[in-house]
Image: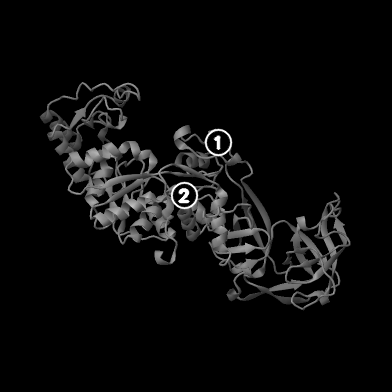
Amino acid sequence: MDTKTETKLASSSNFIKTIMSEDLKSGKTKTIVTRFPPEPNGYLHIGHARAITINFELADEFGGRTHLRFDDTNPTKEDVEFVEAIKEDIQWLGFDWEGLFFASDYFEEMYERALLLIRKGKAYVDEQSPEQIRETRGTLTEPGQESPYRNRPIEESLDLFQRMRSGEFKDGEKVLRAKIDMASPNINLRDPVIYRILHATHHHTGDKWCIYPMYAFAHPLEDAIEGVTHSLCSLEFEDQRPFYDWVIRECEMPNVPRQYEFGKLYITGAISGKRHIRKLIEDGVLDGWDDPRVMTISGMRRRGFTPEAIRAFIRETGVSKSNGVVDSRMLDHFIREDLKLKAPRTMGVLRPLKVVITNYPEGQVEMLDAEINAENPEMGVRQIPFSREIYIEQDDFMENPPPKYHRLYPGNEVRLKHAYFIKCENVVKDADGRVVEIHCTYDPETKSGSGFTGRKVKGTIHWVEATRAVPAEFRLYEPLVLDGEVEDEEADNGAAGSRSINPNSLEVLQGWVEPEMSEAKAHDKFQFFRHGYFNVDPKHTTADKLVFNRIVPLKSSFELPKAKG
């Protein structure tokens, strides 16, 4: 990505940028090295997109580099499918890593560092059950209780740990714990488990290992091995920083990275948590991890969000030391701003009503000129067919309209976008009294672009010529969560049922689009006149069926705050 042509992360709220700048000036750091370290156990979401952008753009701005590292220390939850999906998402966002690494590549060195801790008297093999370890850990106000195995001889722990590796023991039978301080006010320093037994096939190392390091132990070692200078993570890891530093120090790592935490950003009405999404998929609410209603990167891509808009949104929100909440309409704003000069304009009728123009010659079809994008004249002009029969929106006709209704009703005249004035003469109803067709007349003198000034009309409506129209499905989305709620996985333990799911988050309509749309391909984006921006759905579109996802409506009441000063 060429960041020279793009706005950098908001420096006014970016304390990490300040730290990096000072470290380079002082000589503490020669080259900035960051990393994005996802666990390959699921799909990335908007929070990951923020972390990706922060890591890559900051390193790039200072002439450094960013590693992609898969923290694959839990073989029961990880899969190659997620590895490939994560790589695709990062590249789609516009970033390229310098160095692709796996935590599992370092398992041998991690094992040797664990042996070093045991020899130094800084780690021991514990034979308590997970429940016993949990019960004796203590609370925020009470110290923990020492394990009866805490002071076992070093040689005994060495022997047991080596036998753990050789596969002599069952899962959960023994663990290796760091030996720090069971009375520490920071619970993370109360002899945390750093290795456990797990007889499971690993996606990258196969069956070579049956003991695996815990994330909190592995992560700082990985950073140090790779020469990471600034290890950036979200705020919930702040309490883990003392253990991070302890591991680096006591394992005698030659490179000393520093961990810095930044606040999470919550988006109103959005769901991105893996447990939430998995539950909604299992319940049949969502059609997969790429459902356009969730904030996974694959879901946003399928809906039609652009990487440029996502990056601009992340830059605008900045980097702060505290968690924050952002209105989802702010992200929509950046999508409109990105698409307004890119997306071709076209017309689509989502809820069709047939119109017959009775005084237009039967069998005649004429081609009318229409700009591809009125805000970007360089995109040129397209041609659209017009004939005796067209479709309009049901909402653009009322038999008994209220005051100030300027669209079609008996006796009223409106302009057809890019075409002529038409006047409603009468209606055709079915046996139940519902209007199924309206008959109009047109004035051939009023052709768009002809310079006609004889009279004016107050309403302009869109339409699609009926004989050549292409059938299409339209999927309209509303927030998945009602009342602008904010997701907090920690607060509800991922219980998706504790949130108010919007039963009307998806509306599916069958309508018509202009004939040239038959050439549209997956991920092509358009602005449908009066309806908003739409993306060709890559999952459900086939050679015989066009499916459009509405990315965002055309208008919003949201405005960016004005800059101070």
| Label 2 CA crowd tier, 10 Å (few <14, some 14–19, many 20+) | many
Image quadrant occupied by the N terminus: bottom left
Badge number at residue 334: none
Coordinates of residue 37 in the picture (x, y in percent): 33, 49
**In the image, residue 67 above or below residue 198:** below
| Residue 199 visible somewhere in the drawing | no
**In the image, residue 62 above or below residue 221:** below
Q: Quadrant of residue 504?
A: top right
**Residue that sits furthest to the left in the current view:** 155
In terms of secondary structure, where does tag 2 sit?
Answer: helix
| Residue 350 visible somewhere in the drawing | yes
Q: Is residue 238 left or right of residue 252?
A: right
| Label 1 CA crowd tier, 10 Å (few <14, some 14–19, many 20+) | some
Task: Depth check: give the residue in front, 223 or 293.
Answer: 223
**In the image, residue 302 above or below residue 355:** above
Q: Which residue is mark 2?
A: 46
Type of amino acid at the residue the image marks with label 1:
Arg
Q: Residue drawn at (23%, 23%), measured in percent from left and top?
A: 147
Asked if marks 1 and 2 touch (Cβ < 8 Å), the reply is: no
Q: Residue drawn at (83%, 61%), measured in percent from left and top?
A: 438
Q: Is residue 475 left or right of residue 466?
A: left
Q: Residue drawn at (27%, 28%), measured in percent from left and top?
A: 190
Task: Depth check: give the residue in front, 13 or 280.
Answer: 13
Coordinates of residue 326 in the picture (x, y in percent): 52, 46
**In the image, residue 222 above or below residue 447:** above
Q: Which residue is mark 1?
A: 499
Type of amino acid at the residue the image marks with label 2:
Ile
Q: Is residue 377 left or right of residue 15?
A: right
Total marks placed? 2
Coordinates of residue 220 in the picture (x, y in percent): 26, 44
